[in-house]
Amino acid sequence: MLRLEKTKENRSDILSLFGEVDASNSVILDEAIQELVASGTKSLIIDGKNLEYISSAGLGVFMSYLEDFQDQEISMKICELTPRVFEVFRILGLDQLIPIYPDRAAAFAE
């Protein structure tokens, strides 16, 4: 099950993920990101503190935005991943494509 929470902090949109992102619910994550882009966000921070699992479908959602965000000058950062979830990002090399920070403070500092 996936639950999302949207907040604003320091002129950034924060999208907090709770639970699991898999093939059955990755569209929910995609729609939430689309809504934030449509609302004009220029800074998006994905808070993964409560993300227990992410499948390749979930990772694909993030990957699908990389080029568009670069073209639109939208900053996307991820913070507070659990070691297990971070390892999935690292194995697939996504930690080289998306900035990943240990906590929100570090994400805001960049």
Image (cartoon, grey):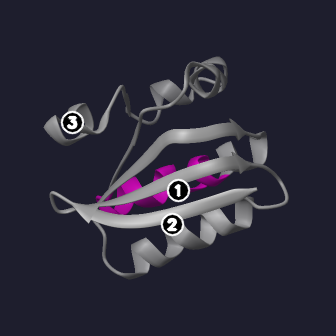
Q: Is residue 80 above or below residue 28?
A: above
Residue topped by disc 2? 33
Relative to 91, does residue 9 appear above or below in the rendering? below
Residue beneath the point at 50% across and 31% down: 81
Question: What's drawn in magenta, residue-wise?
Answer: 61-74
Name the residue tied to disc 3.
105
**Label 3 – label 2 distance at C-alpha:** 21 Å
Secondary structure that dominates the magenta span: helix
Q: Residue furthest bottom?
A: 39
Contact check, label 1 and label 3, Cβ < 8 Å? no
SS state under label 1: helix
Name the residue carrying label 1: 65
Q: CA distance from mark 1 to mark 3?
A: 24 Å
Q: Amino acid at mark 2?
A: Ile
For the C terminus, which image quadrant?
top left
Three-letter code for the amino acid on which mark 1 is drawn: Tyr
Q: In terms of sequence position, does the residue under pointer 3 or pointer 2 come before the other?
A: 2
Disc 2 on helix, strand or loop?
Answer: helix
Q: Is residue 59 magenta?
A: no
**Where's residue 86, x and y in %?**
56, 24
- Could you say which quadrant of the image residue 10 lies in? bottom left
Instruction: For marks 1 and 3, give the one nearer the viewer.
Output: 3
Name the residue located 43 percent from the left edge and 45 percent from the top edge: 47
